[in-house]
Amino acid sequence: MAALSQPEDNSDCVTSSPRKENELYVPKKTPDQRCDVILVVKDGKEFKAHKRVLSEASPFFEKLLNSDMKESREGIVRLEMFSESAMRNTLQFIYTGDVQILAEENARDLVISADYLFLPNLKTLAEAALVKMLNTSNCISVYNFSQSYHCQELLAKTEKYILANFTAVYETNREEVLNMSSKEMEMWLSSDEINVGAEEDVFNIILAWIDHNRSKRQKYFVELFRHVRLVFASRDFLSSDILMNDLVKDNESCLNRVVDAINLIDSHKYCNLSISP
């Protein structure tokens, strides 16, 4: 079988294959080259493959299989951190340049295997699949995953998705948001791209985050509170909920900010403000 040439950049789409979802991809022996390496994955599942094809596709295999290492001499490579489906899909991509990605778990597995085996085109394809699967339930998890595996394009698009749907993301992933660090909270709340239903939501999210562990987090209130765009909250909310809040009343700078916002709203200059929440 001829070695696979590098596939074209298809980062904007997820390619499909006529191969059935559960059908194992098994390289066949050819007249000029027999299967001369066995890949052993989780649960002892074995895949037969060709050293030359693997070596030309992946720097990992090239170094491993063309040396005096045990794996090269014995023709057995143990990759027991990979599942059967992950290796099946990885081999299908190596041999055909094409793979069908139908589920989020499969896409994540392929990002991991591509990262480990130095297969950048497969990684790009799997990242594109994850982007298409983004929703308010999985976006924070995908964001953290993309950081762990240095998926810069996926990271940027997931960040954009979270900011564009921040209120819904918070409501769907309340526990995950409340377990964020102070730096993570400030990163999200300080962004000019954040999209919330009302500025009141930002204040309430800060209070919920503080109350999740008040004894340790109260000290971060002032730092987070400065990211509330007070002049875009309603005057009633400012005077009742914010001005009367203990955390605000206990800090002179916070209190002055609220009073200044109320005075600005009451002034003739308020109608000239053009920045919305």
Image (cartoon, grey):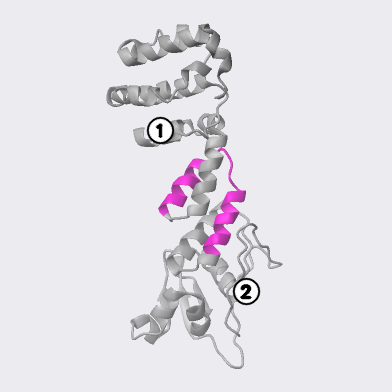
Residue plotted at (55% across, 27% down) = 196
Task: Tell me which numbered mark, 2 or 1, is placed earlier along the sequence.
Answer: 2
Few, some or many residues within 10 Å of mark 2 (<14, 14–19, 20+): some
Few, some or many residues within 10 Å of mark 1 (<14, 14–19, 20+): some
> Which is nearer the eye, 129 or 41?
129
Confirm or deny contact between disc 2 and disc 1 (CB under 8 A): no
Q: State the residue lying farthest toward the right.
A: 18
Q: Assign a secondary structure to mark 2.
A: helix
> Which is nearer the eye, 191 or 115?
191
Which quadrant does the C terminus fall into? top right
Residue plotted at (50% across, 78% down) = 54
Q: In this view, does 236 lie above or below 128?
A: above
Residue 142 counted in the magenta span: yes
Q: Position of residue 12 (x, y in %)?
A: 63, 57
Q: Assign a secondary structure to mark 1.
A: helix
Tell me the chief SS of the magenta region.
helix
> Which is nearer the eye, 199 or 39?
199
Residue bounds of the magenta highlight? 122-148
Residue type pointed to by label 2: Thr
Q: Is residue 97 above or below residue 70?
A: above
Residue 95 counted in the magenta span: no
Residue bearing the label numbered 2: 96
Residue 191 seen from this side: yes
Q: Where on the picture, by quarter, is residue 213?
A: top left
Residue bearing the label numbered 1: 185
Is residue 37 left or right of 7 when viewed as pictured? left
Q: In this view, does 247 lie above or below 87?
A: above
Which quadrant does the N terminus fall into? bottom right
Label 2 to label 1: alpha-carbon separation: 44 Å
Q: In this view, does 85 lie above or below 212?
A: below
Is residue 59 left or right of 99 when viewed as pictured? left
Residue type pointed to by label 1: Met
